[in-house]
Amino acid sequence: MDEKQLRCLVALQDIDIMIQETEGEQKLGFKTEGINKLKATREELTEKIEKPLFRRYELLRQHYKRAVVPVQDNTCLGCFVKLPTSLTTRGKENIEVYTCENCGRILYWLD
């Protein structure tokens, strides 16, 4: 996976959260605009993400609000468990899909 795939995945997650919040506001009776544009943008992003990675993201999203989380100070910011040194070294050097051994979320490293 390249950096572009990861960026698309993070953007997709942000859009999914915005769609979910907007739909929640609509259920409460608030007038909202732009949800159709958000959904169209989501469709564009899903086409840019490799199918296996997208399926993995969708499965994780069923369990967590955030399926893709950053790593900071060698800690998964999804479950706050310290990651093994071998994983953090490889994760910083390579752009690959790594998952937290504890919660299973997709990880990315902050610069």
Image (cartoon, rainbow, N blue to C red):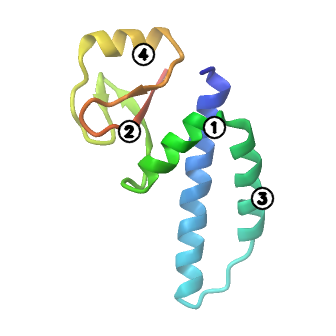
Residue 22 lies, with reference to residue 12, above or below; the image says below
Q: Name the residue at the bottom extreme.
A: 29
Q: Earlier in the sequence, mark 4 or mark 1?
A: 1
Residue 20 lies, with reference to residue 72, above or below; the image says below
Number of numbered markers: 4
User: What residue would you read off at disc 1?
Assistant: 51
Q: CA distance from mark 4 to mark 1?
A: 22 Å
Circle 2 Cα neighbour tier, 10 Å, few/some/many (<14 / 14–19 / ≥20): many
In contact (CB < 8 Å): disc 4 and disc 1: no
Q: Earlier in the sequence, mark 2 or mark 4?
A: 4
- Amino acid at dot 4: Gly
- Amino acid at dot 2: Arg
Residue 30 lies, with reference to residue 77, above or below; the image says below
Q: Quadrant of residue 54?
A: top right
Q: Which mark is residue 91?
A: 4
Label 2: which secondary element: loop
Residue sitting at 33 percent across and 37 percent down?
Answer: 104
Q: Which mark is residue 90?
A: none
Label 4: which secondary element: helix
Q: Which mark is residue 105?
A: 2
